[in-house]
Image (cartoon, rainbow, N blue to C red):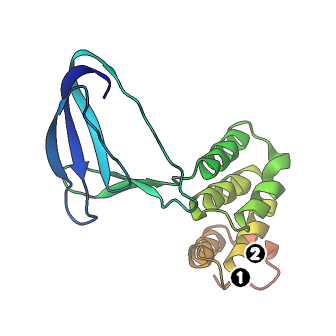
């Protein structure tokens, strides 16, 4: 903190149970370090704060988690990598724009080597924009034994084929539903 005064809280989360809360007095000279297990919140200000933020991007950042303070339950996970965040936003934007021509590209991206969250988001929008292209990507992903998303993709494919039997006709191999 360079200037200003106020109150804040630091939250330390071990991954089990609710985070530990520490009350902070915000004043010049205070240093706060935050990462995926430590967060902070500004509660009140007596005078405007001036904060110098220095950040470092790790080569392989781990996902960040939004945690329910009362219980410690993870309510949302997001990639800590700015490129992965941009990929998720791009997929959402193409989906919101109804760009069916982007579905094959999104399906190919889903079968790539990027972060699982960004790939799943791309697959979700590919399925919504063009069912055939999205389902082809889903099937490729489901059949890749080395992919961390393969089990979830197989489960989704079975669920979709059960709910929509006509999708089984899109499978090269018989749908396991």
Residue drawn at (79%, 63%) of the image: 108
The residue beneath circle 2 is 140
Give how far across and how far down residue 6 sits, in percent. 19, 23
Could you say which quadrant of the image residue 127 lies in?
bottom right
Task: Measure the alpha-carbon separation of dots 2 and 1.
Answer: 5 Å
Q: Residue at x 28, y 64 (%)?
A: 15
Tally the marks. Answer: 2
The percent coordinates of residue 105 (x first, y second) are: 81, 56
* Residue 144 quadrant: bottom right
What residue sits right under mark 1 in the picture?
143
Which quarter of the figure is the N terminus placed in?
A: top left
In the rendered image, the vertical position of residue 45 relative to residue 106, given as above or below: above
> Is 59 on the left or on the right of 3, as rendered?
right
Please say if the residues under marks 2 and 1 sit with CB atoms less than 8 Å apart. yes
**Quick check: 101 above or below 8?**
below
Q: Residue at x 59, y 47 (%)?
A: 82
Name which residue lies at 57% across and 79% down.
Answer: 151
Q: Please, what secondary structure does the residue beneath circle 1 have?
A: loop
Check the image and report above or below for 15 versus 175: above
Query: Can you give x and y, in whole percent of width and height, for residue 112 in the image?
Result: 73, 67
Mark 2 crowd level (few <14, some 14–19, many ≥20, 10 Å Cα) = some
């Amino acid at each position: 903190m360079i200037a200003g005064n106020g109150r804040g809280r630091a939250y330390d989360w071990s991954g089990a149970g609710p985070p530990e809360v520490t009350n902070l007095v915000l004043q010049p000279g205070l240093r706060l370090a935050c990462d995926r297990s430590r967060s902070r919140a500004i509660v009140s200000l007596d005078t405007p704060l001036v904060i110098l933020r220095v950040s470092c991007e790790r080569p392989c950042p781990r996902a960040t988690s939004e945690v329910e303070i009362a219980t410690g339950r993870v309510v949302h996970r997001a990639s800590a990598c700015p490129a992965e965040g941009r990929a998720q936003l791009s997929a959402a934007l193409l989906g919101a724009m109804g760009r069916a021509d982007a579905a094959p590209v999104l399906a190919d991206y889903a079968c790539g080597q990027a972060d699982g969250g960004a790939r799943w988001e791309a697959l979700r929008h590919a399925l919504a924009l063009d069912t055939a292209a999205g389902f082809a990507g889903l099937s490729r992903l489901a059949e890749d034994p080395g992919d961390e998303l393969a089990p979830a993709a197989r489960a989704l494919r079975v669920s979709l084929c059960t709910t929509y039997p006509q999708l089984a006709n899109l499978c090269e191999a018989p749908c396991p539903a």
